[in-house]
Amino acid sequence: MELTPNQQAISLAALMFLRGSASFESSLHDEEKVALQLLKQAKAVVPGVANSRDAECAFCGLYRGPIFRSDEGLMVQCPDCGPFALDPASQRSWRLDDEWLIRKLRGALDISPHATTTQIVDGVWDIGRHKKRPVVLARRIDLVERHGLRIFHGPETRSQSWVITPRPLVRSSLEPLAGTATWWQLEDRFALHGLALRLLDPDQGENADVLQDNIPGVAVHGPFSDDFAWVHLEGWPHGPIHLTEAQARLFSALWKHRNQAQSAEFLMREAGLGSERPIDVFKLKRSNRGIPQYEGPLYAYEKLVVRQRRYGQYRLAL
Ligand SMILES: [Zn+2]
């Protein structure tokens, strides 16, 4: 898919925010250089700290050599290619201005300029409220997972937050914040629009969330809704149980093969999941114990899945 210069710019901004440190202008690809120009115009980037000690060799590009002063001005000594005059442009580096990003996101989300921004932990900020829910900005999603207890449960609780992070470099679990917060990937949800950021399709996104979060699907396949996102169990006092995508896919696989017990390996492959055993996608974090929203899926697992110990096979108890 071809990206527009504005999309390139928000992608580069997200990447630079994720890195947190300065990037050398000379190390960028051609499209990224165009994107950088847009970010400079938007005043989204600030110059990195100049490195006066060494520079990449302009000839071989393999080594960095020390910078030294000579009669002809500043020189670089490549261990392989020898000395050459330093091009000051090769030393230019830029980092994304975190404050700029916070300011622009607040603008895009209609957060009052008077609301305070607080840093929760290093690389994670509370930037205000959007539609009465807290907005958490983080450099990386793994920071949110690692500090989840601190971010969502105290000293200030932030239930059902919007969490904004750049797209992860490596794709990990499908829904790391399922049930806890709504995860927005910066590049997908926001667009650079002149000098401002704009939230993309807010109405559509909102509706999708409401549908997913609040309206339980009726039981179609046994106790499961048509999309397997909901389970209706009589013994559970808190109403229909909402499953994560991974849990829904596992139950869907179990349902499909309900007439015959299957091995864990087979089921996990059918469900397209990377974990080893079905129980892996139901495990509770210590901090979520006792909360019906998290206990529900585990209850459903315990009620509905039978493991035949002798053969290590699983089937639905229906
Ligand atoms: Zn060289």
Image (cartoon, rainbow, N blue to C red):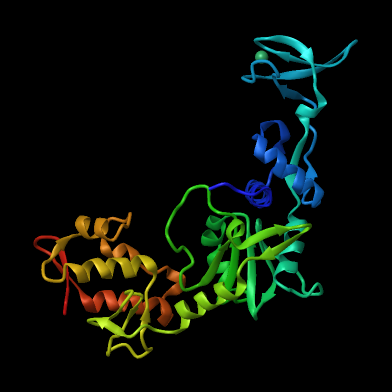
Tell whether 47 sits left or right of 23.
right
Q: Quadrant of residue 138?
A: bottom right
Residue in the image at 10% along x and 60% along y:
311
Residue 77's spot in the image, x, y percent?
Answer: 74, 13
Q: Quadrant of residue 112?
A: bottom right
Tell whether 36 sits left or right of 158.
right
In the foreground, 6 or 190: 6
Whether residue 162 is visible here, answered yes or no, is yes
Tell whether 305 sits left or right of 247.
left
In the foreground, 114 or 282: 114
Q: In which quarter of the image is residue 297?
A: bottom left
Whether residue 51 is visible here, answered yes or no, is no
Residue 218's spot in the image, x, y percent?
Answer: 33, 85
In the foreground, 127 or 225: 225
Residue in the image at 69% along x and 43% along y:
21
Residue 68's spot in the image, x, y percent?
Answer: 81, 16
Q: Is the residue 109 above or below the residue 280 in the image? A: below
Tell whether 153 sits left or right of 105.
left
